[in-house]
Image (cartoon, rainbow, N blue to C red):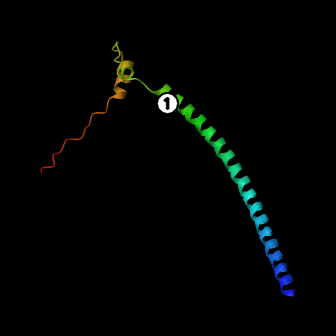
Amino acid sequence: MFSNRESARRSRMRKKQQIEVLHYQVNQLQTLNYQLSQKIIYMLECNQHIQQQNAQLREKVSSLQLTPSELFVIPVGHDDQSQHILNSFLPEPSTRPIVSSGV
C-alpha cells in the first residue's frame, strides 16, 4: 500500500513537471510567433516600399529611353551648333598608328 502511494506521488510529480515544461514551451512558441508576425509585417512593408521605388524607376527609365529614330536625327542646317551636337555622338578618331603583330 505504501509502495502504491509512493508510485502515485511520483506519477503526479512527473505529470506536474511535464505540464510545466509544456507551459514553458507554449510561452516560448507564442513569443516566437509574435516575433515572426512582426517580421512578416516589416517585410511586407519593405516589399511595398521597394515595389513603389521599382515602379518609379521603371517610369524614369521609360521616359529616358529613346527610339532608334530619335538617336539618328540628322540636323538639316549646317550651322556649327548642329555639327557640334552630331560630332559629340561620334567616336574620336584615333591618332595612334595601327601596328600589325606579325604572326
Q: Residue 62: x, y in percent?
A: 48, 27
> Horizontal placement of 82 versus 102: left or right?
right
In this figure, which residue is indicated by the disc labeled 1?
Answer: 61
Residue found farthest to the bottom: 2
Quadrant assignment for the N terminus: bottom right
- Residue 40's place in the image compared with 18, above or below, is above
Q: Residue 17: x, y in percent?
A: 80, 73
Residue pictured at 35% horizontal, 23% vertical: 86
> Horizontal placement of 84 versus 23: left or right?
left
* Label 1 packing within 10 angstroms: few (<14), some (14-19), many (20+): few
* Most foreground residue, 102 or 94: 102
Amino acid bearing label 1? Val
Q: Secondary structure at mark 1?
A: helix
Residue pictured at 32% horizontal, 29% vertical: 90
Q: Residue 20: x, y in percent?
A: 80, 69
- Locate residue 98: give its quadrant: top left
Residue pictured at 87% horizontal, 87% vertical: 2
